[in-house]
Amino acid sequence: MADTSEPVVRDNPAQERFEVLLDDEVAGFTTYQTVAGAVAFMHTEIDERFEGQGLGSTLVRRALNDVRDRGLDALPYCPFVRAYIRRHREYVDLVPADMRHRFEL
């Protein structure tokens, strides 16, 4: 049996969002739109009951890794995703070079 105390991140394309789950409960999500070879992150939200546990960072890190694995670009319109990329420079390369200035990266 899997250890459900660890957060699980899954892509939910039907709702256009990555979700982070704890004990099979959706604790938060980041919405996206897929556009011309890129994933545009629009909004990230963690349920207040789960705040302060680092779930937002776990969610965004795994979502960005998924984008990288699929060979797509990331467009961080969401302020949380943008701030995460600023703090974790290893993800800047996912943002097209000609758009980094727009996102202040």
Image: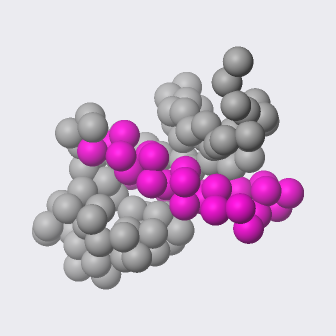
Which residue is at a point 29% across and 71% down the rendered structure image?
Answer: 89
* Relative depth, front residue between 44 and 56: 56
Asked if residue 45 is among those painted magenta in the image, a careful observer would answer: yes
Q: Is residue 10 above or below residue 1?
A: below
Left or right, 97 with reference to 48: left
Q: Residue furthest right?
A: 49
Magenta span: 40-68
Left or right, 100 with reference to 29: left
Q: Residue furthest top?
A: 1
Where residue 82 appears, as percent x and y from the top left, is: 42, 70
Where residue 87 appears, as percent x and y from the top left, is: 40, 76
Left or right, 103 with reference to 83: left
Where residue 6 appears, as percent x and y from the top left, is: 66, 41
* Relative depth, front residue between 56 and 99: 56
Q: Quadrant of the N terminus?
A: top right
> Is residue 43 in view?
no
Asked if residue 11 is among those painted magenta in the image, a careful observer would answer: no
Where residue 99 appears, as percent x and y from the top left, is: 21, 68
